[in-house]
Structure formats: C-alpha cells, structure tokens
Image (cartoon, rainbow, N blue to C red):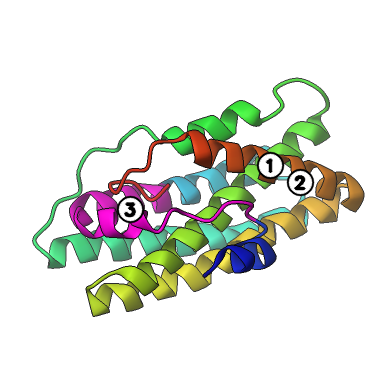
Amino acid sequence: MNEEDVKNILGLQLPTDPRWVDLAGLSMEAILTDHAYCEQKAATSCISLIQRYADKEKLVTELAPIVTEEWGHFRLVLAELQKRGLHLGKQRKDIYVNKLLEFQRKGGSVEDRFLDQLLTMALIEARSCERFKRLSEGLDDAYLRKFYRRFMESEAGHYTLFIDLAETYIDKEKVRTRWAAWLEYEAGVMQSTELRGDRIH
C-alpha cells in the first residue's frame, strides 16, 4: 500500500514508516500481545457506545455483531500466542490512542461529543487496517502474512461502518468537515510519535 492508496482507500494523510514492519518482525510476542489488547479494547469500546446510546437503534444493531467479532479476534490472537509458546504480556499504555482522545471535544453539544467518539473509532480502525496490511505484506513469516491479511480485511469494513453511523445521525457535511480535521490531527500524531516495533499503533 503506497502513500496514494493510503489516502484514497483509508483517507489517512500519512502512511506508516516502512521500517515499522521490520521492527515488528523482531518483537512478535510484543506485537501479538499489543494486538490482543487492541482487539479487546475495540470490543469494550463498542459495548460502551451501545450502553451510552441505546436509543439509537441502527447503532445498537450494527455494533452488536462487531463486539462478537472483535472478541473473536482477541481469542484468535491469544491462540496464536499460545501456539507459538509465547505469553500474553501486560497491557501497555497506548500513546497513540491517548493522543487521539485529547482531540475529542469534551464540552459542547452531545452531538459533537458523539461525533468525535465515532470518528475516533473510525480512525483507529483505519490505522489498524493500514498497519495490518503492512504486516500482511512485509513479515518474513508466510503464515503470519496470511493471518494479518484476514485482520486487514475486517478492519477496513469497521472503519467505514463508523463513518456511516456518524452520517446516519449527524449532518453529512458536518461529519466530513470534522473528519478532515481528525485526519490532519492524526497525521501530526504519527509524525510526533516515536516509531516502535512493539506496538500496533
């Protein structure tokens, strides 16, 4: 996936540094551990949205199976760790996600906060998709390349779902304007964050 594809397909303004895959390949236990927790947090975040916005029928209906899917992904990654004789390490602070949370609007209207929550999820899924594609193309381990290809395809669908949900409940022009601001902010986060091979993000 080149820089043009990253922008056209996922909207991301900045592709991952190609060196990241090489670093990740050297620390697969750490990468798989971090990946497992990413899937776990994705499931719990969807549960939180369902609980908070239970009155939004489409959101509840669309996110309910995502909870099951993300938890299934957690179990798949956990099984992969165990199969390789590796261990699920401790959850680490996710600097990337924490920086995204700083951009969320804390005040303002309920709609504004709701929009930012959905767009944060969309952005995390888009970046995860891009990272999984990097792994599916760049790892030396052929089995893991296929393993991450499956995750890449899944995350692409999740990214578009959160955008669609935002446009279901909020004016599309407002969504697109705020999404552009999120993409610009995320590019800055990527530029300022240390390149590490033991993290998915």
* SS at badge 3: helix
**Number of marks:** 3
CA gap between label 1 and label 2 equals: 6 Å
* SS at badge 1: helix
Residue 134 lies within the magenta run: no
Q: Which residue is mark 1?
A: 184
Query: Along the line of sight, which residue is nearer the eye, 195 or 93?
Result: 195
> Viewer-nearest of labels 2 and 3?
2
Q: Is residue 165 above or below residue 108?
A: below
Q: Residue placed at 47% from the left, 64% from the top? A: 69
Check residue 36 in the rendering and tell me which mark sits there, or answer none.
3
Q: Amino acid at mark 2?
A: Ala
Tell me where residue 151 appears, x and y as whole percent. Answer: 43, 68
Which stretch is magenta? Answer: 12-40
Q: Residues within 10 Å of mark 3 (few under 14, many from 20)?
A: many
| Quadrant assignment, res 32 | bottom left
Tell me where residue 112 appears, x and y as whole percent. Answer: 80, 33
CA gap between label 2 and label 3 equals: 29 Å
Q: Earlier in the sequence, mark 2 or mark 3?
A: 3
Q: Which residue is mark 2?
A: 180
Check residue 149 in the rendering and tell me which mark sits there, or answer none.
none
Residue 1 visible? The answer is yes
Tell me where residue 138 appears, x and y as whole percent. Answer: 34, 70
